[in-house]
């Protein structure tokens, strides 16, 4: 950590039904324990944002979304705007997750528009970057991450409106994680890019690590310099695991 308040964010991906409110209830109940060292955010599917945002009122937990359309409204069947998500009670939106980049062909330019949409709706943009296994094997990790940052981050980022998530694609859902040294190298590189582009604000923008974070590896990963929290997939579906990870921050 670099003195920044950590953010522990859960990305539920395409998981969760109304009945999952009981898991959220356990998170709310446990949020006052050791987990209170961090800001806590759960990003359920869009169908649950409204209900979950109502449920967390009065608790330290916040609710976010996983994607948005760049436009505020219009003829875009099946899409959801940042304004709609804000209206439902979301405080943040994940944009540019590698699953969306892969499944929906999202480019850096589109991700940037989505981050700008989040800001237009006064929401925090959590912008995801990360290399594939092939890119890593070819020694292109920093080049890929640098290009994604340059293309995906809008001008005018601040510590209040932007969070960057480094998620190596090969570590997502695989149980494999980079070594702390590798994480330190990439997060240090991201920090340099942020300070070069956003000067003083860049030093205070939180950089999350994501990819197979679980209670057993959280303390080691969260202790790495310039790791200011985690973006958690699978382990965020269980209140005990999510709270244990939050409790492991330095
Ligand atoms: O993609 C992720 C979070 O956005 C990470 O997923 P896992 O924690 O399941 O590896």
Image: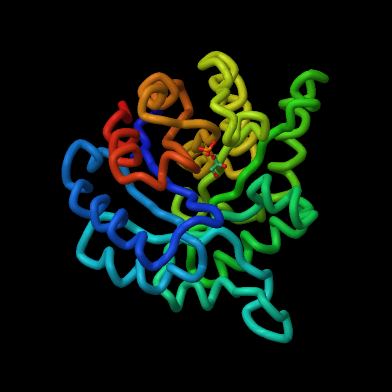
Q: Residue furthest right?
A: 138
Is residue 248 shown left or right of residue 224? left
Above or below, comparing residue 37 to residue 104 in the picture: above
Q: Residue at x 33, y 47 (%)?
A: 39
Instruction: Note whether residue 35 is visible.
Output: yes
Displayed-image quarter of ligand 1: top right
Taking the view exactly as shown, the residue that stands out farthest to the bottom is 75
Q: Give the color scheme: rainbow, by chain, secondary structure or one colour.
A: rainbow
Q: Is residue 168 above or below residue 138?
A: below
- Quadrant, the C terminus: top left
Q: Quadrant of residue 71?
A: bottom right
Quadrant housing the N terminus: top left
Residue 62, placed above or below residue 50: above
Number of numbered discs visible in the structure rendering: 0
Q: Is residue 195 visible?
A: no
Q: Position of residue 137 (x, y in %)?
A: 78, 19
Q: Position of residue 123 (x, y in %)?
A: 48, 64
Residue 170: give x, y in percent of width and height: 67, 30
Asked if residue 80 is positioned above or below residue 26 in the image, the reply reads: below
Q: Is residue 194 left or right of residue 92?
A: right
The residue closer to the viewer here, 218 or 193, is 218
Q: Please name the residue shown 63% across and 63% down the image.
A: 116
Residue 131 or 206: which is nearer the viewer? 131
Name the residue at 79% across, 24% down.
Answer: 140
Which residue is at a point 63% across and 26% down the rendered structure image? Answer: 189
């Amino acid at each position: 950590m670099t003195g920044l308040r950590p953010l522990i964010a859960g990305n539920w991906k395409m998981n969760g039904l109304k009945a999952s409110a009981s898991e959220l209830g356990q998170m709310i109940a446990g949020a006052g324990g050791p987990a209170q060292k961090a800001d806590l955010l759960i990003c359920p599917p869009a169908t649950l944002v409204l209900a979950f945002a109502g449920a967390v009122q009065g608790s330290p937990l916040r609710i976010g979304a996983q994607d948005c359309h760049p436009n505020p409204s219009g003829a875009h069947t099946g899409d959801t705007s940042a304004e709609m998500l804000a209206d439902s009670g979301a405080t943040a939106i994940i944009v540019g997750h590698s699953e969306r980049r892969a499944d929906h062909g999202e480019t850096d330019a589109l991700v940037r528009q989505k981050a700008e949409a989040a800001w237009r709706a006064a929401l925090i943009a959590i912008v995801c970057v990360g290399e594939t296994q092939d890119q890593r094997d070819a020694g292109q990790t920093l080049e890929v991450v640098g290009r994604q940052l340059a293309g995906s981050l809008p001008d005018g980022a601040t510590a209040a409106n932007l969070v960057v998530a480094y998620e190596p694609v090969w570590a997502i859902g695989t149980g494999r994680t980079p070594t702390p040294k590798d994480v330190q190298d990439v997060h240090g590189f991201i920090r340099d890019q942020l300070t070069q582009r956003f000067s003083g604000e860049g030093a205070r923008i939180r950089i999350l690590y994501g990819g197979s974070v679980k209670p057993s590896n959280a303390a080691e990963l969260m202790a790495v310099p310039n790791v200011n929290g985690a973006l958690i997939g699978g382990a965020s579906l269980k209140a005990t695991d999510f709270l244990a990870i939050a409790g492991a921050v330095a």
